[in-house]
């Protein structure tokens, strides 16, 4: 029974990362309870990190692909449990066999690739924003300036300047062969205008403040420009 505040001890346990019922049993997944977002994270993990065999926990999968902070680890475990039960949409992780690795706690998942071998030419996506930016610059002609704030004892923070945004926008337009107005003067666009054009080109909203590009947005650009993913499969 819930307390006066409406919160039970189980609620508290479930809110702790890595605690609570992270992975439902096969019996509990007779109906698909996976989310589209969690399935996308699992699909990205398999594409980028599973060559032949790979063992990973839900939290390791979350960290490996830099899943959104708001996505709970439990959602990944639920998606994989549903996949094992055979109730997820057809085609989800069809190129791997999934099993649980022994009786470990927390649960670890074993992936064995059965088809569609991973492309060794596609590197694992960097975790830090600054590394994502540098990787994008390596495979494009972007030379717009960025500002790096060095932090003692921590990771440097990078600020995306409008010149970099304009160059990145040109690269995305070329990569997806987008149909844009011939009168569009990209070199005159403001940060806010760059975000607006990017949203139209990839048919997705830019996350965070629209006048700046956050790490999720840069990660989406990486997926398009470096990994060569279809913009329809990319979130900004």
Image (spheres, rainbow, N blue to C red):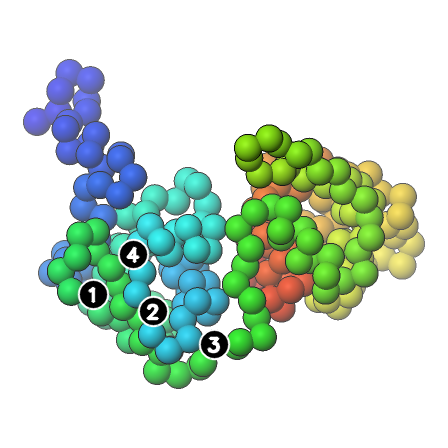
Q: Nearer the viewer, residue 201 or 133?
A: 133
Whichever of labels 4 and 3 marks the residue nearer the N terminus, that label is 4
Tell me if residue 4 comes above or below residue 209 in the rendering. above
Q: Which mark is residue 101?
A: 1
- Give coordinates of residue 131: x percent, y percent: 62, 51
Label 4: how many Cα within 10 Å (few below 14, some 14–19, many 20+): many
Would you say residue 87 is visible in this rendering?
no
- Give coordinates of residue 162: x percent, y percent: 80, 41
Question: Label 4 to label 2, Cα distance in Å?
Answer: 10 Å
- Give coordinates of residue 102: x percent, y percent: 15, 65
* Residue that badge 3 annotates: 118
Question: Label 1 to label 3, Cα distance in Å?
Answer: 22 Å
* Residue that badge 2 annotates: 54
Question: Label 4 to label 3, Cα distance in Å?
Answer: 20 Å
Would you say residue 207 is visible in this rendering?
yes
* Residue that badge 4 annotates: 57
Image quadrant assignment for residue 83: bottom left
Residue at the (21%, 56%) spot, across then down? 107
């Amino acid at each position: 029974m819930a307390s006066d505040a409406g919160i039970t001890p189980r609620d508290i346990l479930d809110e702790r990362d890595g605690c609570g019922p992270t992975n439902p049993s096969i019996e509990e997944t007779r109906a698909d309870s996976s989310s589209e977002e969690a399935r996308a994270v699992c699909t990205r993990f398999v594409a980028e990190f599973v060559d032949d065999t790979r063992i990973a926990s839900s939290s390791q999968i979350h960290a490996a692909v830099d899943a959104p902070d708001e996505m709970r680890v439990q959602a990944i475990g639920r998606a994989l449990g549903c996949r094992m039960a055979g109730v997820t949409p057809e085609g989800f992780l069809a190129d791997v066999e999934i099993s649980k690795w022994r009786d470990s706690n927390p649960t670890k998942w074993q992936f064995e690739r059965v088809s569609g071998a991973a492309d060794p030419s596609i590197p694992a996506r960097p975790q830090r924003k600054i590394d994502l930016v540098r990787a994008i610059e390596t495979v494009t002609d972007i030379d717009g300036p960025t500002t790096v704030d060095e932090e003692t004892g921590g990771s440097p923070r990078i600020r995306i300047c409008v010149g970099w945004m304009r160059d990145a926008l040109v690269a995305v337009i070329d990569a997806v062969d987008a149909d844009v107005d011939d009168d569009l003067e990209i070199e005159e666009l403001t940060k806010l205008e760059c975000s607006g054009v990017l949203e139209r080109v990839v048919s997705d909203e830019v996350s965070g403040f629209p006048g700046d590009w956050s790490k999720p947005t840069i990660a989406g650009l990486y997926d398009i420009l470096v990994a060569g993913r279809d913009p329809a499969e990319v979130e900004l």
